[in-house]
Image (tube, rainbow, N blue to C red):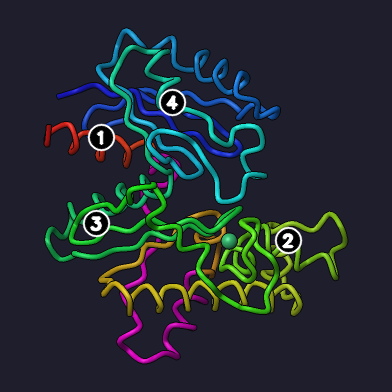
Amino acid sequence: MKTWLAVDIGGTKLAVAIVRGSNILCREQMTTPSSQSPDAMTNALSELISPFLNEVDAVAVASTGIIDHGILTALNPDNLGGLNQYPLQQVLIDMTGLPVTVINDAQAAAWAEYHALSSSSPSLINNMAFITVSTGVGAGLVLDQTLQIGRRGIAGHAGHTLADPSGPRCGCGRIGCVESIASGTAMGVAGRSFLGESSDGHKVYRQHLAGNEQASLIVQRSALTIANLIADLTISLDLDVVVLGGSVGLAQGYCDMVDTALAAMPAIYRPKVMTATAGNDAGLLGVVHWAESNFEKR
Ligand SMILES: [Zn+2]
């Protein structure tokens, strides 16, 4: 069995772990460098990874952004600042001298959730979507029991499908994406009308739970938008299961609101909706599963 160095690169944190099979043997994390310059990222990765290099056989990375042939790119370049077009895979090969696999973090999390579900009910799930509602709206697709990556690494970016043609402009440049309405960031923007400039998604959600009607309308709009996304994906891809994750997706009562919105639709649009179980380590575990199965194919 290989010993993996798993790396999770998020907008706010960098995490590394030693992983064997489905076991995380040790885990470290640090804050993503705020300057977001290529040099700052390379230095931070080096600092985090160096202590573990003698213990591992290969490196598996789950990263925010689109991973196009090992290069980190973004639908919304502002999200990555100076890291757009960062040659992540080559940097890590040069740094470690080891084989390096890199995929998108929502794709990796989808694969982790699929593994968790299929180990308890093998072969029952053929097609699955994982949707994370958090700062943004990310997704990953498993079709015919295989994680979808796509030639350019884009597969599964369902947060940028259309929710409302007269909605706000999304960070990607398109008008009315799901992310521009349903994400925690979008809820925070919508909450400015009554919470002021310091409004954010967490504050809106707390107000919703406290019974504030304006806040509840915003949260309900988010949940309805995600329910419509689930219905669209289900009728397009014949999904068996949708797994909902992320800080908004797992917030108190959110999944129930999505379920309620789906219940108003014809049965054919309604897959089984479950909440994510792999938690903070989903990206780390998912990319190791993915890298391991790809190594076996070689
Ligand atoms: Zn978009």
Q: Nearer the viewer, mark 2 or mark 1?
A: 1
Tell me the CA gap for discs 3 and 4: 24 Å
281 magenta-colored? yes
Q: Nearer the viewer, mark 3 or mark 4?
A: 4
Residue that badge 2 annotates: 188
Tell me the CA gap for discs 4 and 2: 30 Å
Q: Earlier in the sequence, mark 3 or mark 2?
A: 3
Tell me the CA gap for discs 3 and 1: 19 Å
The reply to whether discs 3 and 1 touch (Cβ–Cβ < 8 Å) is: no
Residue toward you, 53 or 245: 53
Q: Is mark 2 within 8 Å of ligand 1?
A: no
| Residue 127 drawn at (x, y percent) | 24, 65
111 magenta-colored? no
- Identify the element where label 1 is drawn: helix
Residue that badge 1 annotates: 291
- Identify the element where label 2 is drawn: helix
Q: Amino acid at mark 2?
A: Gly
Tell me the CA gap for discs 3 and 2: 33 Å
Seen in the picture, residue 137 relative to 294 is either above or below; the reply is below
Q: Is residue 133 left or right of residue 50?
A: right
The reply to whether discs 2 and 1 touch (Cβ–Cβ < 8 Å) is: no
Residue that badge 3 annotates: 117
The reply to whether discs 3 and 2 touch (Cβ–Cβ < 8 Å) is: no
Residue that badge 4 annotates: 16
Using the rendered view, name the quadrant where residue 167 is placed: bottom right
- Identify the element where label 3 is drawn: helix
Q: Amino acid at mark 1?
A: Ala
Q: Over which residues does the magenta segment extend?
A: 255-283
